[in-house]
Amino acid sequence: MRRSVIRGSGHYLPERIVENSWFEERLDTSDEWIRSRTGIERRHFAAEGQTTSDLGIRAARAALDDAGLVADDIDGIVVATSTPDLTFPSVGTMVQAGLGIKRGFAYDVQAVCAGFVFALANADAMIRAGMAERILVIGAETFSRIMDWTDRSTCVLFGDGAGAVVLEAQDAAGTSNDRGILAADLNSDGTHRDLLYVDGGVSSTGTAGQLRMQGNLVFRHAVEKLSKTAATSLGKAGLTDKDVDWLVPHQANLRIITSTAQKMGLPMEKVVLTVADHGNTSAASIPLALSVANQQGRFKQGDLLVTEAIGGGLSWGSVILRW
Ligand code: COA
């Protein structure tokens, strides 16, 4: 059978780093509150005029370099984002043009913070169906553009950035020892719309809008749903928590990550953490974490990775893959 193996990864973070102290000067908040409630210490914000596709192009180039490939080797591009440059065309096509690719397909997937997990599962399905040999899967966001800077309960949480992986078709035996994506579990429940949303859009207000969140309610859903989806997709792969070498979670809140790891019986040494330095970069957070950990040489070939995320919708899911 065919499996989708990660051949390379890369990321890009905007140059401007904003420490928690920046918010202390502007809002009734403190570095201590932000660190202790979220684990976030700093985040990157895109420069004026720097768009989501700019970040995505840089991450894609880094992933191609890491894979030892050139742009023409790519058959398709799937970008997970909720903060596109324009309403259309897709960020995917902008990345495609930026890389100088004129063949294959490019489009966006929108599942907010769960976007990269959805995009990865989507690209994997296309590769296994024989629709492409190599797909660039990118998570790229500029959440700084949809912040209400007067709302201390949201604006301290998010950051900008992009991460990318090159997924490549490889022949495999069809067992849980194969390299590549072994299973995925995707879920949505649109009745929770009001817990986390942006209060503007093309067909409603005609504006981009700003992020609104009932953080404590989202927190409760996250803790419950993330360990459940991880168990579901591990089960689909015929594996258990004990087989996991690395948890690469969505980086929203250290307390959510810690509690998910605890429920899975994983020590924190097996968890990739970037939330302190990146904040919540929505769909970019998992590929950023993957790329940072890969650059640090933390993954060995054959390691079993679990990625999981939850976001607006609500939408949540997980992907099991062997490095
Ligand atoms: N600085 C200081 N105080 C703050 C604050 C800030 N930046 N933000 C909120 N507060 C205050 C609130 O106003 C509230 O004050 P009150 O009790 O006087 O009303 C108090 O802190 C507690 O608020 P609450 O929302 O219950 O805090 P919390 O412990 O749930 O932490 C979050 C808030 C947002 C950090 C937390 O709920 C969270 O991380 N939720 C999940 C968010 C998430 O992951 N979203 C993305 C999913 S993709």
Image (spheres, rainbow, N blue to C red):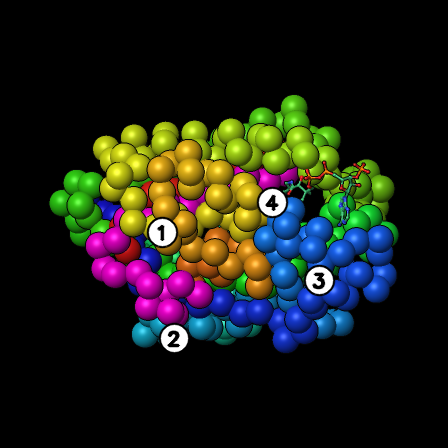
Q: Tell me, for residue 20, which label it has, or none.
A: 3
User: Which-is-in-front pick, marks 2 and 1?
Assistant: 1
Residue sitting at x 58%, y 26%: 189
Q: Which residue is mark 1?
A: 270
**Of 157 and 109, the residue lying toward us:** 157
Mark closer to the chain start, 1 or 3: 3
Three-letter amino acid code at the position of disc 3: Asn
Residue sitting at x 42%, y 41%: 261
Is residue 129 left or right of 257 when viewed as pictured?
left
Q: Is residue 293 magenta?
A: yes
Distance from label 4 to label 2 (Cα)?
27 Å
Three-letter amino acid code at the position of disc 4: Val
Is residue 223 left or right of 14 when viewed as pictured?
left
Residue sitting at x 63%, y 75%: 15
Is residue 68 left or right of 179 when viewed as pictured?
right
Mark closer to the chain start, 3 or 4: 3
Q: Residues within 10 Å of mark 1 (few under 14, many from 20)?
A: some
Query: Which percent across, then down, holds residue 111?
Result: 57, 42
Residue 178 vertical position relative to residue 45 in the rendered view, above or below = above
Q: Is mark 2 within 8 Å of ligand 1?
A: no
User: Which-is-in-front pick, marks 1 and 4?
Assistant: 1
Q: Is mark 4 within 8 Å of ligand 1?
A: yes
Q: Tell me, for residue 144, which label it has, or none.
A: none
